[in-house]
């Protein structure tokens, strides 16, 4: 039997409360978004060891294989904006989480693509990082029941949330460094004409 189409994904939009944000508040703008992701991951990571129903002695992540539609749960998509979202796809023995990083301009797109590629080439060191993201997303994680047998669930969730907090700041820092370097190159180049 071909796998049945999974139900339409649930979608949440997290919006900030209106008000002024000071520099001291820092990541408080991200807090409702990250809290929603944390709670959804906490609920989705209730996975168990479940062998394949089709092939004997095989235990593959059902979210990746997708052979039994009854083992796949509802997909949840959490939006912060049109440019920033997370898709969490739970199954009976695994959870796949895909992240779309905020990209406001072409420079952000290039830096996000290069940074994600750098991380995915080192996916073995991250254990839960997939080598290829889901279409429409920048980075994907795959957490299986085997990962949760050797790692603490709350620490795994903390790692993912910290990763999401820091990836935006890393890309912003790289963008500032590229702009500073371009400014210095332009200054040095134009200085030759003034001499």
Image (cartoon, helix red, strand yellow):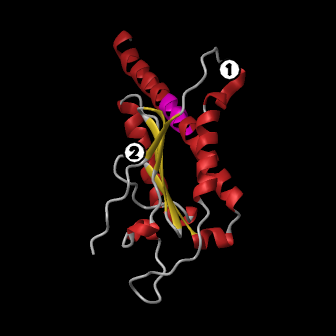
Q: Nearer the viewer, residue 23 or 57?
A: 57
Q: Compared to 30, does 18 lie above or below? A: above
Secondary structure of the residue carrying tag 1 is helix
Q: Which mark is residue 113?
A: 2
Going from N to C along the chain, the mark reached first, 1 or 2, is 1
Instruction: Name the residue rendered at 67%, 27% in the picture.
Output: 26
Marks 1/2: CA–CA distance: 28 Å
Quadrant including the N terminus: bottom left
Q: Residues within 10 Å of mark 2 (few under 14, many from 20)?
A: some
Q: Is residue 50 magenta?
A: no
13 w.r.t. 130: above or below: above
Nearer to the camera, 47 or 172: 47
State the extent of the magenta-drawn residues as a range: 170-177
Residue at the spot 49% in from the left edge and 64% down from the top edge = 91
Residue nearest the observer in this picture, 97 or 108? 97
Residue at image position (65%, 58%) is 156
Quadrant for residue 166, please give it. top right
State yes or no: residue 172 in magenta.
Answer: yes
Q: Secondary structure at mark 2?
A: helix
Q: Position of residue 149 (x, y in %)?
A: 66, 73
Q: From this viewpoint, which residue is outermost toward the top?
A: 194
Is disc 1 surrounded by few (<14), some (14 to 19) or many (20+) residues within 10 Å? few
Q: Position of residue 174 (x, y in %)?
A: 51, 35
Asked whether the beta carbons under mark 1 and mark 2 sit within 8 Å of each other, the answer is no
Mark 1 — residue?
A: 23
The image quarter containing residue 125 is: bottom right
Left or right, 101 with respect to 21, comes to left
């Amino acid at each position: 039997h071909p796998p049945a189409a999974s139900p339409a994904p649930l979608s949440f939009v997290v919006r900030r409360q209106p008000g002024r944000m000071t520099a001291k508040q820092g990541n408080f703008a991200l807090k409702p978004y990250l809290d929603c992701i944390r709670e959804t991951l906490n609920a989705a990571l209730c996975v168990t060891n479940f062998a394949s129903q089709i092939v004997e002695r095989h235990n593959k992540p059902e979210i990746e294989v997708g052979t039994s539609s009854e083992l796949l749960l509802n997909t949840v998509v959490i939006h912060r904006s049109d440019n920033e979202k997370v898709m969490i796809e739970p199954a009976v023995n695994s959870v796949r989480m895909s992240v779309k990083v905020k990209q406001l301009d072409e420079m952000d797109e290039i830096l996000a693509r290069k940074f994600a590629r750098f991380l995915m080439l080192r996916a073995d060191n991250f254990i839960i990082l997939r080598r290829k993201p889901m279409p429409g997303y920048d980075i994907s994680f795959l957490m299986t029941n085997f990962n949760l047998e050797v790692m603490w669930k709350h620490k795994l969730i903390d790692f993912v949330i910290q990763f999401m907090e820091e990836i935006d700041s890393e890309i912003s820092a790289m963008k500032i460094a590229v702009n500073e370097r371009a400014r210095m190159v332009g200054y040095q180049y134009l200085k030759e004409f003034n001499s």
